């Protein structure tokens, strides 16, 4: 898992470069919501040979098909965020520095992972 912090009102698409430039294993698919529907994102994914599973925004002039069956797997990501936000410290961001907040996100992620392993 990779986590980064962006500004308060920053659009989702701004975080794309932060996460995709890391030296992580190359993904085959990129599942995202409409916030990532940008030509720049789609071009970068195509250059790297990654299949974009991103629904189109309403104001798009050119529509592309989305594999709806595959897109349903995105709910796993949403459920992960929901489980992370069950920790009040993550949901309300009590920490003053970004480093301590990211550290607690890592701790909360390990906690969720250990709960998954114990069931």
Image: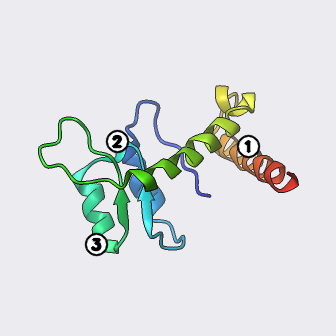
Which callout, 3 or 2, points to the residue nearer the camera?
2
Of residue 67 and residue 76, the one placed in the foreground of this image is 67
- Kindly report the distance in space between the C-alpha atoms of the residues bearing marks 3 and 2: 20 Å
Which callout, 3 or 1, points to the residue nearer the camera?
3
Residue 95 position in % (x across, y down): 69, 32
Task: Return the residue at label 3.
Answer: 47
Residue 61 position in % (x across, y down): 11, 44
- Furthest-front residue in this view: 69
| Residue at image coords 66%, 25% | 92
Which callout, 2 or 1, points to the residue nearer the camera?
2
* Helix, strand or loop at mark 3: helix
| Residue at image coords 72%, 49% | 109
Crowdedness of circle 1 by 10 Å Cα count: few (<14), some, many (20+)?
some
- Kindly report the distance in space between the C-alpha atoms of the residues bearing marks 2 and 1: 28 Å
Task: Return the residue at label 2.
Answer: 34
- Kindly report the distance in space between the C-alpha atoms of the residues bearing marks 3 and 1: 35 Å
Q: N-terminal of the two: label 3 or label 1?
A: 3
Q: Are marks 2 and 1 in contact (CB under 8 Å)?
A: no
The quadrant the N terminus occupies is bottom right
Q: Are marks 3 and 1 in contact (CB under 8 Å)?
A: no
Task: Return the residue at label 1.
Answer: 104
Using the image, determine if residue 5 lies above or below residue 17: above
Residue 9 position in % (x across, y down): 41, 30
Position of residue 20 in the picture relative to residue 58 (left or right):
right
* Helix, strand or loop at mark 2: helix
Using the image, determine if residue 20 lies above or below residue 55: below
Crowdedness of circle 3 by 10 Å Cα count: few (<14), some, many (20+)?
few
Q: N-terminal of the two: label 3 or label 2?
A: 2
- The quarter of the displayed image where residue 75 is located: top right
Q: N-terminal of the two: label 2 or label 1?
A: 2
Crowdedness of circle 2 by 10 Å Cα count: few (<14), some, many (20+)?
some
């Amino acid at each position: 898992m990779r986590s980064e912090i962006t500004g308060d009102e920053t659009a989702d698409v701004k975080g794309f470069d932060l996460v995709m430039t890391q030296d992580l294993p190359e993904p085959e698919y990129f599942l995202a919501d409409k916030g990532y529907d940008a030509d720049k994102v789609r071009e970068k994914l195509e250059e790297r040979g990654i299949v974009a599973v991103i629904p189109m925004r309403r104001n798009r002039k050119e529509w592309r098909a989305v594999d709806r069956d595959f897109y349903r797997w995105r709910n796993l990501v949403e459920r992960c965020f929901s489980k992370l936000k069950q920790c009040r410290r993550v949901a309300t961001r009590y920490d003053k520095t970004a480093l301590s907040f990211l550290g607690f996100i890592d701790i909360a992620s390990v906690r969720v992972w250990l709960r998954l392993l114990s069931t």
